[in-house]
Image (cartoon, rainbow, N blue to C red):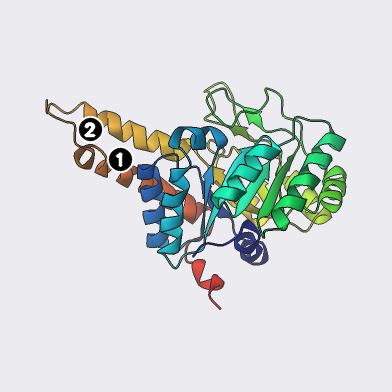
Amino acid sequence: MLVSGKEILKIAHERNFAIPAFNAGSGQLLEGVMRACENLNSPVIIAIHPDELSFLTDSFVDQVKYYANNTTLPVCIHLDHGATFEQVIHAIQLGFTSVMIDASHMDFEDNIEISKKVVEAAHAVDVSVEAELGTIGDTGDSIEGGVTEIIYTDPEVAKEFVTRTNVDSLAVAVGTAHGLYPENMKPKLKLELIDQIAEKIDVPLVLHGGSSNPDEEIKVAVTKGINKINISSDIKIAFYEQMKVVMENDRKELREPNVIFPSCIEATQKVAEEKINLFNSADKAKYYYK
Protein backbone atom coordinates (compact mmCIF):
# COMPACT_ATOMS: atom_id res chain seq x y z
CA MET A 1 0.00 0.00 0.00
CA LEU A 2 1.23 3.46 -0.91
CA VAL A 3 1.71 5.75 2.09
CA SER A 4 3.30 9.12 2.81
CA GLY A 5 6.63 9.65 4.45
CA LYS A 6 4.93 11.05 7.53
CA GLU A 7 2.73 7.96 7.85
CA ILE A 8 5.53 5.45 7.43
CA LEU A 9 7.92 7.26 9.79
CA LYS A 10 5.33 7.92 12.52
CA ILE A 11 5.19 4.24 13.50
CA ALA A 12 8.97 3.89 13.29
CA HIS A 13 9.35 6.92 15.56
CA GLU A 14 6.87 5.56 18.08
CA ARG A 15 8.31 2.04 18.10
CA ASN A 16 11.99 2.90 17.85
CA PHE A 17 13.12 1.34 14.58
CA ALA A 18 14.38 2.67 11.26
CA ILE A 19 12.78 2.38 7.84
CA PRO A 20 15.22 1.35 5.09
CA ALA A 21 15.24 3.87 2.25
CA PHE A 22 16.68 2.04 -0.74
CA ASN A 23 17.92 3.94 -3.79
CA ALA A 24 16.71 1.27 -6.21
CA GLY A 25 17.99 2.85 -9.40
CA SER A 26 16.76 0.14 -11.79
CA GLY A 27 13.91 -2.30 -12.15
CA GLN A 28 16.19 -5.16 -11.11
CA LEU A 29 17.35 -3.39 -7.95
CA LEU A 30 13.72 -2.56 -7.17
CA GLU A 31 12.77 -6.22 -7.54
CA GLY A 32 15.59 -7.26 -5.19
CA VAL A 33 14.68 -4.86 -2.39
CA MET A 34 10.96 -5.55 -2.68
CA ARG A 35 11.60 -9.30 -2.42
CA ALA A 36 13.62 -8.63 0.72
CA CYS A 37 10.88 -6.51 2.26
CA GLU A 38 8.19 -9.07 1.41
CA ASN A 39 10.31 -11.86 2.83
CA LEU A 40 10.91 -10.03 6.13
CA ASN A 41 7.57 -8.16 6.29
CA SER A 42 9.26 -4.77 6.44
CA PRO A 43 7.90 -1.33 5.55
CA VAL A 44 10.06 0.37 2.93
CA ILE A 45 10.89 3.70 1.35
CA ILE A 46 11.91 3.62 -2.30
CA ALA A 47 14.17 6.62 -2.74
CA ILE A 48 14.87 8.08 -6.17
CA HIS A 49 17.54 10.74 -6.69
CA PRO A 50 16.93 13.35 -9.44
CA ASP A 51 19.91 11.97 -11.38
CA GLU A 52 18.45 8.47 -11.16
CA LEU A 53 15.06 9.75 -12.29
CA SER A 54 16.67 11.55 -15.21
CA PHE A 55 18.25 8.27 -16.32
CA LEU A 56 15.27 6.01 -15.64
CA THR A 57 12.71 8.54 -16.94
CA ASP A 58 9.39 9.39 -15.30
CA SER A 59 7.89 6.04 -16.31
CA PHE A 60 9.94 4.32 -13.60
CA VAL A 61 7.71 5.91 -10.96
CA ASP A 62 4.75 3.98 -12.37
CA GLN A 63 6.74 0.78 -11.90
CA VAL A 64 7.31 1.63 -8.24
CA LYS A 65 3.62 2.49 -7.86
CA TYR A 66 2.72 -0.93 -9.28
CA TYR A 67 4.78 -2.65 -6.57
CA ALA A 68 3.26 -0.40 -3.90
CA ASN A 69 -0.30 -1.02 -5.06
CA ASN A 70 0.19 -4.77 -5.24
CA THR A 71 1.59 -5.41 -1.79
CA THR A 72 0.19 -5.12 1.71
CA LEU A 73 3.50 -3.66 2.89
CA PRO A 74 3.64 0.09 3.54
CA VAL A 75 5.60 1.66 0.67
CA CYS A 76 6.62 5.30 0.38
CA ILE A 77 8.06 6.83 -2.82
CA HIS A 78 10.60 9.46 -1.85
CA LEU A 79 12.51 12.11 -3.80
CA ASP A 80 16.07 11.89 -2.50
CA HIS A 81 18.13 15.11 -2.35
CA GLY A 82 15.81 17.32 -4.36
CA ALA A 83 17.92 20.37 -5.16
CA THR A 84 15.30 22.83 -6.42
CA PHE A 85 11.67 23.73 -5.91
CA GLU A 86 11.01 22.71 -9.51
CA GLN A 87 12.38 19.19 -8.94
CA VAL A 88 10.14 18.83 -5.90
CA ILE A 89 7.01 19.94 -7.75
CA HIS A 90 7.81 17.59 -10.62
CA ALA A 91 8.12 14.69 -8.18
CA ILE A 92 4.79 15.56 -6.56
CA GLN A 93 3.14 15.64 -9.97
CA LEU A 94 4.53 12.16 -10.71
CA GLY A 95 3.02 10.74 -7.54
CA PHE A 96 5.87 10.77 -5.02
CA THR A 97 4.46 10.64 -1.50
CA SER A 98 7.51 12.18 0.15
CA VAL A 99 10.08 14.72 -1.02
CA MET A 100 13.40 15.95 0.25
CA ILE A 101 14.58 19.49 -0.27
CA ASP A 102 18.32 19.57 0.34
CA ALA A 103 19.39 23.17 0.85
CA SER A 104 21.99 22.27 3.47
CA HIS A 105 24.71 23.95 1.40
CA MET A 106 22.87 27.29 1.67
CA ASP A 107 23.07 29.60 4.65
CA PHE A 108 20.59 28.99 7.46
CA GLU A 109 17.97 31.58 6.49
CA ASP A 110 17.96 30.55 2.83
CA ASN A 111 17.60 26.90 3.86
CA ILE A 112 14.62 27.86 5.99
CA GLU A 113 13.06 29.93 3.21
CA ILE A 114 13.09 27.24 0.54
CA SER A 115 12.18 24.48 3.01
CA LYS A 116 9.11 26.48 4.13
CA LYS A 117 8.14 26.99 0.49
CA VAL A 118 8.38 23.26 -0.20
CA VAL A 119 6.43 22.39 2.97
CA GLU A 120 3.62 24.76 1.99
CA ALA A 121 3.30 23.22 -1.48
CA ALA A 122 3.76 19.59 -0.44
CA HIS A 123 1.51 19.60 2.62
CA ALA A 124 -1.29 21.05 0.52
CA VAL A 125 -1.47 17.70 -1.30
CA ASP A 126 -0.56 15.44 1.67
CA VAL A 127 3.04 14.89 0.61
CA SER A 128 5.66 14.76 3.37
CA VAL A 129 8.86 16.80 3.47
CA GLU A 130 12.37 15.96 4.62
CA ALA A 131 15.05 18.63 4.90
CA GLU A 132 18.72 18.55 5.83
CA LEU A 133 20.67 20.58 8.37
CA GLY A 134 24.43 20.40 8.57
CA THR A 135 26.43 18.76 5.79
CA ILE A 136 26.95 15.08 4.98
CA GLY A 137 30.45 14.06 3.97
CA ASP A 138 31.41 12.91 0.48
CA THR A 139 33.74 10.00 -0.27
CA GLY A 140 33.86 10.98 -3.93
CA ASP A 141 31.95 8.10 -5.55
CA SER A 142 28.30 8.92 -4.96
CA ILE A 143 25.56 10.69 -6.92
CA GLU A 144 24.20 12.10 -3.67
CA GLY A 145 27.22 14.39 -3.30
CA GLY A 146 28.27 16.00 -0.06
CA VAL A 147 31.25 17.96 1.19
CA THR A 148 34.82 17.13 2.10
CA GLU A 149 34.43 18.46 5.64
CA ILE A 150 31.33 17.56 7.66
CA ILE A 151 29.49 20.40 9.40
CA TYR A 152 27.73 18.71 12.30
CA THR A 153 24.10 19.48 13.06
CA ASP A 154 23.69 21.80 16.04
CA PRO A 155 20.81 20.63 18.30
CA GLU A 156 19.61 24.15 19.17
CA VAL A 157 19.72 25.21 15.53
CA ALA A 158 17.84 22.03 14.58
CA LYS A 159 15.08 22.92 17.04
CA GLU A 160 14.68 26.38 15.51
CA PHE A 161 14.79 24.97 11.98
CA VAL A 162 12.04 22.39 12.57
CA THR A 163 9.86 24.91 14.44
CA ARG A 164 10.10 27.52 11.69
CA THR A 165 9.76 25.17 8.69
CA ASN A 166 7.34 22.48 9.96
CA VAL A 167 9.23 19.75 8.08
CA ASP A 168 8.15 16.16 8.77
CA SER A 169 11.65 14.70 9.16
CA LEU A 170 15.20 15.98 9.38
CA ALA A 171 18.41 14.58 7.89
CA VAL A 172 21.19 15.24 10.36
CA ALA A 173 24.97 15.36 10.01
CA VAL A 174 26.44 13.19 12.76
CA GLY A 175 29.52 11.71 11.09
CA THR A 176 28.55 9.87 7.90
CA ALA A 177 29.46 10.33 4.25
CA HIS A 178 27.80 9.38 0.99
CA GLY A 179 29.38 6.46 -0.84
CA LEU A 180 31.89 3.87 0.35
CA TYR A 181 34.80 5.05 2.46
CA PRO A 182 38.36 4.58 1.14
CA GLU A 183 40.71 2.50 3.27
CA ASN A 184 42.41 5.55 4.81
CA MET A 185 39.09 7.09 5.94
CA LYS A 186 37.52 5.68 9.09
CA PRO A 187 33.85 6.57 9.70
CA LYS A 188 32.65 7.25 13.21
CA LEU A 189 29.21 8.37 14.29
CA LYS A 190 28.81 10.95 17.03
CA LEU A 191 26.19 8.91 18.85
CA GLU A 192 25.92 11.39 21.70
CA LEU A 193 25.00 14.10 19.18
CA ILE A 194 21.99 12.04 18.05
CA ASP A 195 20.83 12.00 21.68
CA GLN A 196 21.21 15.76 21.94
CA ILE A 197 19.27 16.42 18.72
CA ALA A 198 16.50 13.97 19.65
CA GLU A 199 16.06 15.76 22.98
CA LYS A 200 15.41 19.04 21.20
CA ILE A 201 13.07 18.00 18.37
CA ASP A 202 10.27 15.48 18.10
CA VAL A 203 10.36 14.57 14.41
CA PRO A 204 11.95 11.44 12.92
CA LEU A 205 15.68 11.80 12.28
CA VAL A 206 17.27 10.60 9.05
CA LEU A 207 20.74 9.16 8.51
CA HIS A 208 22.32 9.61 5.08
CA GLY A 209 25.53 7.96 3.99
CA GLY A 210 25.75 5.09 6.47
CA SER A 211 27.04 2.44 4.07
CA SER A 212 30.51 1.99 5.59
CA ASN A 213 29.79 2.76 9.23
CA PRO A 214 30.16 -0.26 11.54
CA ASP A 215 26.95 -2.21 12.05
CA GLU A 216 27.19 -1.75 15.82
CA GLU A 217 27.17 2.04 15.42
CA ILE A 218 24.16 1.90 13.12
CA LYS A 219 22.32 -0.43 15.49
CA VAL A 220 22.85 1.97 18.40
CA ALA A 221 21.88 4.99 16.28
CA VAL A 222 18.50 3.38 15.61
CA THR A 223 17.83 3.13 19.35
CA LYS A 224 18.61 6.83 19.77
CA GLY A 225 16.05 8.26 17.34
CA ILE A 226 17.24 7.53 13.79
CA ASN A 227 14.06 6.40 12.00
CA LYS A 228 15.13 6.40 8.33
CA ILE A 229 18.43 5.24 6.90
CA ASN A 230 19.36 5.69 3.25
CA ILE A 231 21.01 2.76 1.50
CA SER A 232 22.38 3.17 -2.01
CA SER A 233 25.99 2.04 -2.46
CA ASP A 234 25.66 -1.28 -0.65
CA ILE A 235 22.89 -2.73 -2.80
CA LYS A 236 24.39 -1.41 -6.03
CA ILE A 237 27.83 -2.82 -5.26
CA ALA A 238 26.30 -6.22 -4.49
CA PHE A 239 24.33 -6.18 -7.74
CA TYR A 240 27.23 -5.25 -9.99
CA GLU A 241 29.82 -7.46 -8.30
CA GLN A 242 27.53 -10.40 -9.01
CA MET A 243 27.01 -9.16 -12.57
CA LYS A 244 30.77 -9.26 -13.11
CA VAL A 245 30.77 -12.88 -11.97
CA VAL A 246 27.98 -13.70 -14.42
CA MET A 247 29.63 -11.87 -17.32
CA GLU A 248 32.95 -13.64 -16.75
CA ASN A 249 31.21 -16.92 -17.49
CA ASP A 250 32.62 -18.83 -20.46
CA ARG A 251 29.31 -18.82 -22.30
CA LYS A 252 29.78 -16.85 -25.51
CA GLU A 253 26.11 -16.16 -26.16
CA LEU A 254 25.35 -14.61 -22.80
CA ARG A 255 22.91 -11.84 -23.63
CA GLU A 256 19.44 -12.58 -22.27
CA PRO A 257 18.38 -10.42 -19.29
CA ASN A 258 16.58 -13.37 -17.72
CA VAL A 259 19.92 -15.21 -17.68
CA ILE A 260 22.15 -12.30 -16.61
CA PHE A 261 20.06 -10.68 -13.87
CA PRO A 262 18.50 -13.34 -11.59
CA SER A 263 21.56 -13.96 -9.41
CA CYS A 264 22.23 -10.19 -9.31
CA ILE A 265 18.73 -9.65 -7.97
CA GLU A 266 19.36 -12.34 -5.37
CA ALA A 267 22.60 -10.61 -4.31
CA THR A 268 20.68 -7.35 -3.91
CA GLN A 269 17.98 -9.10 -1.89
CA LYS A 270 20.56 -10.60 0.47
CA VAL A 271 22.12 -7.22 1.29
CA ALA A 272 18.70 -5.58 1.63
CA GLU A 273 17.65 -8.27 4.12
CA GLU A 274 20.82 -7.65 6.15
CA LYS A 275 19.95 -3.95 6.34
CA ILE A 276 16.34 -4.62 7.29
CA ASN A 277 17.48 -6.79 10.19
CA LEU A 278 20.11 -4.26 11.22
CA PHE A 279 17.55 -1.44 11.28
CA ASN A 280 15.11 -3.57 13.30
CA SER A 281 12.35 -3.10 10.71
CA ALA A 282 11.73 -6.82 10.10
CA ASP A 283 8.16 -7.85 10.91
CA LYS A 284 7.16 -4.24 11.58
CA ALA A 285 4.65 -3.97 8.72
CA LYS A 286 2.03 -5.44 11.07
CA TYR A 287 1.90 -2.18 13.01
CA TYR A 288 0.51 -0.31 10.01
CA TYR A 289 -2.69 -2.37 9.75
CA LYS A 290 -5.69 -0.92 11.50
User: Do labels 2 and 1 touch, CB within 8 Å?
Assistant: yes
Q: Position of residue 147 (x, y in %)?
A: 68, 25
Q: Position of residue 6 (x, y in %)?
A: 66, 60
Residue farthest to the bottom, as pictured: 290
Q: Residue at point 30% right, 40% down?
A: 264
Residue located beneath label 2 in the image: 246
Name the N-terminal-most of marks 2 and 1. Answer: 2
Tell whether 204 sits left or right of 19.
right
Tell whether 92 sits left or right of 121.
left
Please, what secondary structure does the residue beneath circle 2 have? Answer: helix
Q: Quadrant of the C terminus?
A: bottom right
Residue located beneath label 1 in the image: 264
Residue 121 circle label: none
Tell whether 36 sits left or right of 75.
left
Mark 1 residue type:
Cys
User: Is 184 situated above or below 123?
Assistant: above
Q: Residues within 10 Å of mark 1 (few under 14, many from 20)?
A: many
Q: Position of residue 11 (x, y in %)?
A: 62, 66
Q: Nearer the viewer, residue 33 or 51?
A: 51
Q: Residue at point 48% right, 42% down?
A: 58
Q: Residue at point 38% right, 37% down?
A: 238
Q: Nearer the viewer, residue 196 or 102?
A: 102
Mark 2 residue type:
Val
